[in-house]
Image (spheres, rainbow, N blue to C red):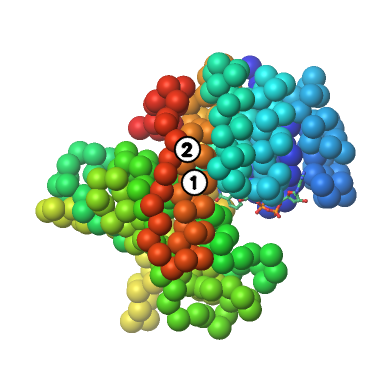
Amino acid sequence: MTVRVGVIGTGMMGQDHIRRISRVLAGGAVTAVSDADADRAARVAAGLPGARVHPAGQELITDSEVDAVVVTSWGPAHEEYVLAAIAAGKPVFCEKPLATTAEACQRIIKAEQGAGRRMVQVGFMRRYDAACRALRAAVAAGEIGTPLLMHCAHRNAAVPPYGFTTEMMISDSAVHEIDLVRWLFGEEIAAVTILRPRRSSKGAAGLHDPLVVILETAGGILVDVELFVNATYGYDIRGEVVGEHGTVALAGGGPAVLRHDGRRSDAVPADWRERFGAAFDAELQDWLTAVAAGSCTGPGSWDGLAATVIAQAGHEALRTGRRTPVTLPGRPGLYSAAGGPS
Ligand code: NAD
Ligand code: ISE
């Protein structure tokens, strides 16, 4: 079966996912696109023989030639499209964040519960990354003993000079570590603290870059995340778990190490499309396969809600300068299994 996919939001991620569905993955075809920028949608559709362009995302969702929906619009527009897809009975892959407020995520969860089945996969691609999976397997196998600490770095080469706020460093960037930590340790995050080091002059005025985010899990693991979104030299994602009798770290760098002229070097990826390309392929293949089978197995609405609640606690911690406890609602039975590959 070929899953006919409609994509809402044809910017950077939308185009990247369209490319992989059309040219890399099995079992999917993009049959419709839509974007608030109609010219952009038309340009993207021009490279997709037979694909329709819809002026509104809602129309795309009810198109009879669309079986399932990918939402890659801006975060604040995710909720309305995810809700409309659930109402139309169509599975949806939604890029992170699921929605920008806890209330909006709750409305999605309520709609999914009303449908009586999981219909939403959220784009937490690190769960599909080979290095992150190896880290999780080593921790689960007890290779380093009881985990005590984790050190992370999340560095973007740059963020746009306009529109990217200090809050977004938490809800747009650190949201990936928030999800990674929950999935890695199988524990909820209980509190968030934000520290503000000296500001880099490379960020736009008003952006407090870098930040240090401290996450405390319910079981007492302490995770520090250096967030540096104008690091200039490339996209650099690091993680090391410290256990009672060993440590395990994400392997970094490019596929090869060059030794030449008295120096040793390897490549730093330019951005997430390069660093996590294989993980994006795997998450969307998983989604297409599940849609074809009438199921939904990846990270879901509960994970999207938890990440947003924790990010919002991070916003409060940023505002107040205080350690902020996280209060999650009860986890509904529909979401009892951990989403994504084991
Ligand atoms: P982008 O700005 O390149 O593209 C967003 C597109 O959405 C634009 O074309 C814009 O016109 C369109 N849009 C905005 N509001 C809309 C609406 N109401 N209806 C229809 N279209 C609308 O941004 P991007 O980098 O492609 O990010 C898109 C999504 O992907 C965001 O949710 C972002 O957080 C996520 N993202 C995820 C990752 C990841 O690593 N998983 C990486 C980057 C971005
Ligand atoms: C971007 O939106 C992403 O989601 C990337 O994965 C993340 O690393 C980056 O910091 C965000 O800006």
Q: Can residue 249 be seen at all in this image of the molecule?
A: no
Residue drawn at x 50%, y 80% is 199
Callout 1 crowding tier (Cα within 10 Å): few <14, some 14–19, many ≥20 = many
Could you say where residue 312 lies in the image, as x and y percent from the top left? 51, 52
Q: Position of residue 307 (x, y in %)?
A: 48, 45
Question: Which of disc 1 and disc 2 is earlier in sequence?
Answer: 2
Q: Which residue is mark 2?
A: 303
For residue 54, above or below residue 262 = above
**Can you tell me whether the CB of the residue at mark 2 lies under 8 Å from the nearest atom of ligand 1?**
no
Q: From this viewpoint, is residue 75 visible?
A: yes
- The C terminus, quarter of image: top left
* Horizontal side of residue 86 vs 244, given as left or right: right
**Mark 1 residue CB less than 8 A from any atom of ligand 1:** no
Please tell me which residue is depicted at 64% across the width and 64% down the height of the picture. Answer: 164
Residue 257 position, x and y percent, is: 37, 65
> If the image is split into quadrants, where does the N terminus sit?
top right
Mark 1 belongs to which amino acid? Val
Q: Quadrant of residue 25?
A: top right
Please give left or right for residue 142 compared with residue 62 in the image. left
Front in this rendered view, residue 277 or 123: 123
Identify the residue at horizontal 62%, vertical 39% (top origin): 104
The residue identified by callout 1 is: 309
Residue at point 32% right, 41% down?
Answer: 187
Which numbered disc, 2 or 1, marks the residue closer to the eye? 1
The amino acid type, in three-letter code, at marker 2 is Asp
Determine whether the residue tagged by mark 1 lies in a helix, strand or loop: helix
Residue 23 against residue 190 in the figure, above or below = above
| 270 or 183: nearer the viewer | 183
